[in-house]
Amino acid sequence: MRGVAGTADVIVIGAGHSGLAMSRALSLRSIDHVVIERGEVANSWRKERWDSLRLLTPNWMSRLPDYRYQGDDLDGYMSAGEVAEFVSHYATTISAPVITGTTVTKVEPAAGGYRVSTNHGDWRCRAVVLASGACNLPVVPKVAEGVPASVAQVTIHAYRNPAQLGEGGVLVVGASATGLQLAQEINASGRPVTLAVGEHVRMPRLYRGRDVQWWMLASGVLDQCLEEMDDPLRARRLPSPQLVGTRERKTLDLNVLRAQGVEIVGRLVGVRDGRAQFSGSLRNVCALADLKMNRLLGLFDAWAERTGVATEVGPPERYAGTVPDASPRLGLTLGQDVRTIVWATGYRPDFSWLDVPAFDRRGQLKHDGGVVEAPGLYVLGLPFLRRRKSSFMHGTEDDVRDLSVHLAQHLDRTVPLQVSGVAV
Amino acid sequence: MNTQVTTAMNGVNVEALLAAREALTEAPEGARFKWRATSEWVNGTHSRSTVEGFYGLGGEQKHRQKFQFDSDHPEVFASEDKGATPVEIVLVGLAGCLGAGIASVAQNRNIQLRSVKATIEAGMDLQGILGIDENVRNGFDGIKVHYEIDADATQDEIAALVAQSQKRSAVFDIITNPTDVTVTVRKG
């Protein structure tokens, strides 16, 4: 591997599955490039995820361009460590030109393209692919500012397992896959858990005998493009579906957690005088999720009828609606009822080092399906970048194919870099 | 989603709403509204409140006419019952807001409404406002809203209208979530 700064036509930032898939696409086109990685290949999977995390998709779905799961546990779900191994093996298989242990500190426009500054010197390039991931920084809502100092706060970035939490009650905020999984394991550790629930996405793990992700893929839901969405911005903000990958392939939803003793409350909407305040909208967010799940199952059923698949799977199923407590709690005294708050309120990408005028009023990177509003700049791996599957490993292939074509055309249209008067 | 090709007629100008959404995304200043009311004590527990002007779209706006609301307490409270009790007016606000939302969402989803009827009931333990029991709150201990809706849609589609309407309702939000309130006074 090269360790010195230099020039390349394309610099890919991040050696996760997206960056590596792009590297392979560039290699196939003989486009000169390097992949700069702050840590090791698949760094986030090694260092920034909780111990029990497993993919929400079954192993048979784990694939990258010309590379797929080779094991025999097709219906299992990879642990974070297994994902790291899977991605690292891909890097070796495709001989990706990865420079590890190199942190990008700044990307800025420069003559003929961009300057990429790192802790090991500057690179010059004609195009940059941002593949540093969508889950770099934990999102913590503003209400956190009012939480008394006596209450421990843990983000999903720092959370590893229940043993790291103090004794006493735990408030888990957020009802995505993460929030439900953490609520379940913390509750099982003997700490009383309250789960604050806003809008969420409910799904059974298995439907008519098949993994729900099989249905999502086969029926075309995962291939849905951003242009087909009524509200593209909302589609990009959607929390991950309430799923967990276990050997038993069990469904994880609010009814399951409630039966296990987790107290379900409404969205955390305020902290005042040491009290957490929960919204009275719990019933409605549950109703919205139930209705949406049933629409999705209805879509699966219709597709199965249409295609004849219905004869190969079990009969249609419908599930009991989500049942909140008769009078869900509207407040909790922090420090007394709650000793620790776990913020399972999502991740956001970190582009703090990107010094390019391509951000909107809210600080979001402006891009059209991964083509950033700055010539020669591309982004990969964000939720619903181009398709519903964009943030999944198996969704990378189509995005990389589309964007590498655009990138190659950009290189064809622009002139090679001139450094000290010599074309490189 | 229903498949009829005719356009539902619910009297809601959805195109204007969608255009406003687009315009206000580009011009967030115009989206900042201020709603106002004035109120004057009449006698006993009877007050008369008035709404007329409000602020929005970057300037002062006016209703087509002045609207007045009398509020009072009922005779069982030894009052003269010159108007609805203030807590009932809160329920009226919730019903009005959810109803407007249902019609708007139905129009947007091209669902023809034939009738939308709501009954609302809110529980309240007077031991709160009378200061008998510190553990009883002044306000409602819960609100129950029931809708009877006749429309060209399935039960689930109708349920989704009502759910979406709650999700987008200002009054539902005001009631279900805390709001910071500042009250000032001057001797006049």
Image (tube, rainbow, N blue to C red):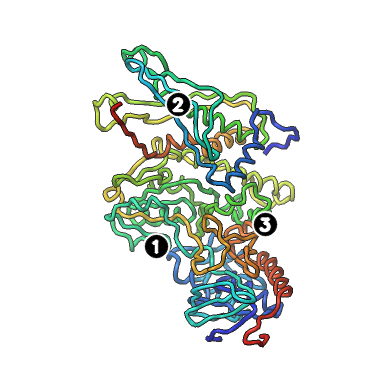
* Quarter of the image with the C terminus of chain B in it: top left
Question: Within 10 angstroms of label 1, few (less than 14), some, or many (20 or more) residues?
Answer: many
Up/down of A6 relative to A257, above or below: below
Q: What separation in Å lies between label 2 and label 3 (alpha carbons)?
A: 44 Å
Tell me how far mark 1 sits from mark 3, CA to CA: 32 Å
Chain containing mark 1: A
Q: Chain of mark 3?
A: A
Q: CA distance from mark 1 to mark 2?
A: 43 Å
Residues indicated by labels 1 and 2 sit on the same polypeptide chain: no
Q: Which residue is nearer to you in this view: B145 or B41?
A: B41
Residue A185: x percent and y percent? 40, 57
Q: Earlier in the sequence, mark 1 or mark 3?
A: 1
- List the residue tagged with mark 2: B91
The 10 Å Cα crowd at callout 3, few under 14, some 14 to 19, many 20 or more, is some
Q: Amino acid at mark 2?
A: Leu
Q: Which residue is mark 1?
A: A159
Within 10 Å of disc 2 (Cα), the crowding (few <14, some 14-19, many 20+) is some
Tell me, for residue A223, which label it has, or none: 3
> What residue is at 50 percent from the left and 57 percent from the top?
A244
Q: Position of residue A159 (x, y in %)?
A: 39, 62
Above or below: residue B56 compared with residue A231: above
Name the element at disc 2.
helix
